[in-house]
Image (cartoon, rainbow, N blue to C red):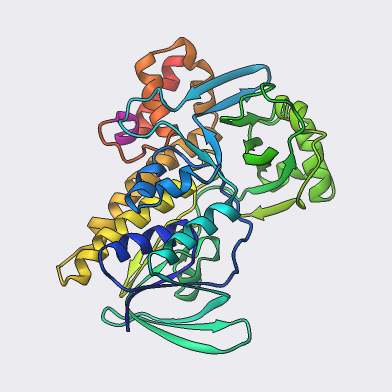
């Protein structure tokens, strides 16, 4: 029997594994995919650097040659507001990277293997027997051979695969409307200096503000381009996802000018109804990390930050539990994690109801102190209790929006 079994070799799984292995526990990761493999969620937030450093892989990431990132630009028609993540109220990292997830995830998995962690690819979890003392996973490889993994605890880091949520019927309907993301990678043909590659560009559709776009410059001349909206809002733009994507990019303003004719380097992909949550993040002998439990929306690139925060929190609680200390997963893991998730949720909701864009596009003429506190949220510092825009996010966003009007 091993100490910890982890489902999924993505960032939350490997970071949790490395933190636990550093504490001396035996860890095995299984993943149904073989790496490298494509994944969405390519724009890190500065707060995430804290947990990469904690796990001992920051140098690996810094030396990997990923695209440097220091902020975000928001565009609505001809209006543009640029937020530099270094100019924030919270202490900590102000810069980070925009990453190709095939390379980033492989880098973390290989780092975990170098630290003595068993990472087994091509194995799917097909069953789970929860137990407070000895939870058991049943896994099956590509040839159909099955085996059991007995562990003292299981962490589900399966991302959108959401293995335990589906296996144990933990899914709960998301409160937000069902939205669709359509995206691809293109080849950037512009010379250096035409636009700021160090920032993600978030654009709003001029005709329908409920549709928005991302443009994420990556290393080696690649750019991730995507559009998000409710299906009925995207449908008028074309009969197929390719037609819709092309028409929507042409209607995106500055992003369309930059990337409308850029050659694609991968097929257009689509994810529908991505928002999800669960009835509980923990149970007898298991806990859910990152997207395996809660996913909000890609608009503020919060997914990876939440995933790494959950890995750090879970590893800390589990380290104590494995030493036979009494722990409370609800108060020590779920509640602290959801504090930041709910702060991010307030900003996602404010984005779609129009109040946050009004605040963002008016911020250059407002209080510098308020701008710095909002920048901290955009940089991922959603667990900073000293920031009232975290502690009382809905109330303060409404107050600022009311004052702007």
In this view, the residue in front, 57 or 322, is: 57
Q: Is residue 128 left or right of residue 42?
A: left
Residue 5: image location, x then y, percent: 38, 74
Q: Quadrant of residue 369?
A: top left
Above or below, comparing residue 226 to residue 387 in the picture: below
Look at the image and tell me whether residue 330 can be seen. yes
In this view, the residue in front, 313 or 329, is: 313
* Magenta-colored segment: predominant secondary structure: helix
In this view, the residue in front, 344 or 235, is: 344
Residue at far top of view? 365
Q: Is residue 279 left or right of residue 97?
A: left
Residue at 26%, 36% in the rendered image: 385
Residue 74: image location, x then y, percent: 58, 26
Q: Please provide the residue range marked out in magenta.
A: 387-392
Residue at 24%, 61% in the rendered image: 317
Where the N terminus falls, by quadrant? bottom left
Residue at 24%, 65% in the rendered image: 319
In the image, residue 319 lies in the stretch drawn in magenta? no
Residue 7: image location, x then y, percent: 46, 70
Above or below, comparing residue 202 to residue 39 in the picture: above
In this view, the residue in front, 3 or 110, is: 110
């Amino acid at each position: 029997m091993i100490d910890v079994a982890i489902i999924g070799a993505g960032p939350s799984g490997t970071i949790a594994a490395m933190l636990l292995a550093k504490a001396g526990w035996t860890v095995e990761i299984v993943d149904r995919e073989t790496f490298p493999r494509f994944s969405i969620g390519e724009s890190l937030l500065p707060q995430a650097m804290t947990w990469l450093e904690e796990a001992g892989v920051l140098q690996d990431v810094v030396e990997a040659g990923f695209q440097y990132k220091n902020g975000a630009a928001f565009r609505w028609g001809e209006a543009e507001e640029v937020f530099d993540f270094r100019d924030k109220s919270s202490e900590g990292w102000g810069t980070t990277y925009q990453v190709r997830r095939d390379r980033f995830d492989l880098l973390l998995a290989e780092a975990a293997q170098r630290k003595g962690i068993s990472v087994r690819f091509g194995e799917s979890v097909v069953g789970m027997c929860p137990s407070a003392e000895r939870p058991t996973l049943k896994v099956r490889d590509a040839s159909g051979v099955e085996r059991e993994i007995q562990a003292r605890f299981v962490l589900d880091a399966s991302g959108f695969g959401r293995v335990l949520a589906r296996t144990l019927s933990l899914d709960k309907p998301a409160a937000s409307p069902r939205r669709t993301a359509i995206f691809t990678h293109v080849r950037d043909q512009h010379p250096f200096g035409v636009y700021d590659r160090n920032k993600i560009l978030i654009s709003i559709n001029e005709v329908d503000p409920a549709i928005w776009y991302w443009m994420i410059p990556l290393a080696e001349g690649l750019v991730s381009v995507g559009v998000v909206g409710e299906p009925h809002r995207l449908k008028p733009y074309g009969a197929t996802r390719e037609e819709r994507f092309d028409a929507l990019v042409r209607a995106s303003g500055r992003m369309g000018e930059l990337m409308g004719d850029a050659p694609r380097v991968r097929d257009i992909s689509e994810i529908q109804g991505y928002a999800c949550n669960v009835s509980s993040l923990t149970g007898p002998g298991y806990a859910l990390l990152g997207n395996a439990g809660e996913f909000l929306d890609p608009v503020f690139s919060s997914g990876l930050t939440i995933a790494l925060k959950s890995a750090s929190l879970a590893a800390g609680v589990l380290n104590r539990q494995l030493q036979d200390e009494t722990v409370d997963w609800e108060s020590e893991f779920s509640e602290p994690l959801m504090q930041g998730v709910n702060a991010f949720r307030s900003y996602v909701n404010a984005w779609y109801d129009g109040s946050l864009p009004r605040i963002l596009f008016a911020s250059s003429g407002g209080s510098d102190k308020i701008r710095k506190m909002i920048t901290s949220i955009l940089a991922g510092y959603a667990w900073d209790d000293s920031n009232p825009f975290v502690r009382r996010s809905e109330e303060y966003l409404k107050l600022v929006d009311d004052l702007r009007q």
